[in-house]
Amino acid sequence: MELVGEKATHHDKSENLREDVLRRLRNIACGALLAGTLFAFGVSNAAQAMGARPSAATAGFRTLTVLDEAGGQSYSAALWYPAHKAESEINDADWLIRCARNGKMADGVFPLVLVSHHSAGSKHSLHDLAAMLAHNGCVVLCLSHSGDNYREAELAFTPELLPVRARQLKRLLDLFLTLPEWGERIDRARIAFVGVGTGAATVLALSGAPLSAQGYDAYCAGNVKDDVYCSQWVRSRMRGLDAAFAAPLPVWKPGALLLVAPAYGMLFEPGAAAALSCPVMVFSAGKTGSYGEKDQTNFIMAALLGRAQKKTLPEFAAEDFLAECPSSFDEPTVACGSAGSAAREMREEAFLHEATAFLTRALGVN
């Protein structure tokens, strides 16, 4: 995927974005995600400062296909959990993952972290964070959102995007908690949500913050010329927000909320999440996205009445939040992190430690 330079025209950005979504509809990994920002200290210092404790177990891993007989759907997910089996490097759907595959789960009842990936992502996009959380005593369930992932994009930039995603996430959670092998090992009073990009807006909506069509119209009234959210092509796809948002969404009040480089923040009115009382941390996007999309953190903070913990990291790039791309991805993409450099690995490690420290503190993991 060729990135758009700063001097490209708004028409070029919109046209390139349109082509990328169409390419993903043909199963090519492309997409758009808001950029993030860089930590100002090294990994070893970051780990010490953030208080991430030593690993208590290995990171058990298995893939799940959860069938919803009532709804006639299935949900593809990755499950991480504390285990007592040696780890090894495995290949799962072209992703290289270090884990204790199908290891026996450690004894105990654990908090659950439910993860919603960014558009163009998958259940593996945050596998490094999931593994670290498993090491630190959490079960982590990562959904691949049907219709909005790196292989399919029919929901991209449509009114149904967030409502469908939120319902998928809630249904998977409900079904998972009924599985005898897993549901009885989850402390239902300690369930957290993690969302990246579009996933951040997804989990905020699932937490009870209502979506607002008026916010999008007002936003684009002042950003038509320089923001891809407001390009002619995207606006044509986003028609019908009022109808899509009319039906109430399911709600689950989380014990903690981690929002990373949030997208679609303009769809939440100020105070929309005022009823949310759990700890919230927001990693803000310091750089403009690849296609000119603007950072949405200020809208998210306004929806939360400014009471969330906010981390602004001016040099972080979008891919630094994500696990490294599989080698089979033969072109640049924001579906996952770019390979390689020590600086990139340092940035990701710092993010992983701070995110893990926040969630384990909020969930009361000893």
Image (spheres, helix red, strand yellow):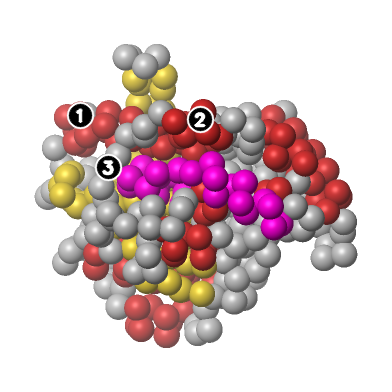
Of labels 1 and 2, earlier in sequence is 1
Q: Which amino acid does label 2 sit on?
A: Ala
> Considering depth in this image, is 321 or 242 the residue closer to the camera?
242
Mark 2 sits on what residue? Answer: 244
Q: In this view, does 78 lie to the left or right of 329?
A: left
Residue 146: percent from left, percent from top: 51, 30
> Considering depth in this image, is 251 or 214 the residue closer to the camera?
214
Residue 276: percent from left, percent from top: 28, 55
Q: Distance between the residues labelled 3 and 1?
A: 16 Å
Of labels 3 and 1, earlier in sequence is 1
In this rendering, the answer to whether 155 lies above or below 252 is above
Mark 3 sits on what residue? Answer: 252
The kind of secondary structure the magenta stretch mainly shows is helix
Q: Quadrant of residue 240?
A: top right
Q: Which residue is drawn at 36% across and 83% down?
A: 49
Of labels 2 and 3, earlier in sequence is 2
Q: Residue 178 carries which label?
A: 1
Q: Tell me if I can see residue 10 in this picture.
A: yes
Residue 169: percent from left, percent from top: 38, 36
Q: In this rendering, which labeled residue sits more in front, label 3 or label 1? A: 3
Report the magenta residues as a range.
200-223
Q: Distance between the residues labelled 1 and 2?
A: 29 Å
> Considering depth in this image, is 307 or 289 the residue closer to the camera?
307
